[in-house]
């Protein structure tokens, strides 16, 4: 499981340090792809396999399913760690997420989200303002 929030800088080659706490769970490799809300998703290979199977099973006759499949699957890349625990984020994914210098890595149990620091702070600010409303809606889901 991945939990916690960490801030790291990208270097000029698009390399990003992955927190030590996360690296041990990613030792068999990882997959990075476009996420939702303008962030990137980083999965273990095992978790990615589960997600990719579910997404690829969506009905291709449904335009929303096709769109989501393209977003998630076409943008996916396997990443490897260098000896200092960094991964290279491909340029097209950095552009998608608006990553330039500072990134936030947020552990969300089965995946890691990678955000530009500015977008993360903005998202957090808005989420905090809507927390009361969101909690009442989540009560209906048993949370």
Image (cartoon, rainbow, N blue to C red):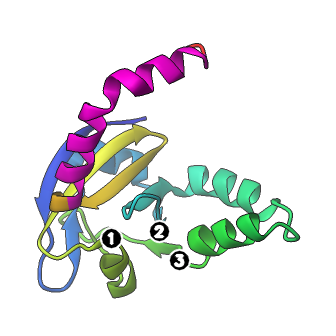
Q: How many marks?
A: 3
The residue carrying mark 3 is 75
Instruction: Quote the CA–CA distance across marks 2 and 1.
Output: 8 Å
| In magenta stretch: residue 122 | yes
Q: Give whichever of 129, 113 is nearer the camera.
A: 129
Rendered residue at 53%/73% (across/down): 76
Residue at 31% x, 51% y is 23
Residue 131 locus on image (x, y percent)? 33, 27
Looking at this view, is 32 or 102 the one in front? Answer: 102
Q: CA distance from mark 3 to mark 2?
A: 6 Å
Mark 3 vs 2: CB contact within 8 A:
yes
Q: Is residue 6 above or below residue 35?
A: above
Decide: marks 2, 1 in contact (CB < 8 A)? yes
Which of the two marks, 1 or 3, is nearer to us in this view? 1
Question: Which residue is identified by label 1?
Answer: 97
Range drawn in magenta = 119-141
């Amino acid at each position: 499981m991945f939990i916690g929030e960490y801030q790291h800088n990208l270097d000029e080659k698009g390399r990003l340090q992955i927190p030590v706490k996360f690296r041990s769970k990613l030792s068999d490799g990882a997959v990075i792809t476009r996420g939702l809300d303008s962030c990137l998703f980083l999965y273990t290979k095992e978790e990615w396999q589960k997600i990719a199977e579910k997404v690829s099973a969506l009905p291709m006759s449904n335009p929303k399913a096709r769109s989501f499949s393209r977003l998630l699957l076409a943008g996916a890349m396997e990443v490897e760690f260098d000896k200092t625990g960094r991964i290279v984020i491909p340029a097209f994914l950095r552009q998608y997420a608006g990553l330039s210098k500072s990134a936030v890595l947020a552990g969300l149990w089965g995946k890691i989200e990678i955000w530009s620091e500015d977008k993360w702070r903005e998202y957090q600010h808005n989420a905090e303002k809507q927390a009361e409303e969101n909690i009442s809606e989540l009560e209906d889901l048993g949370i």
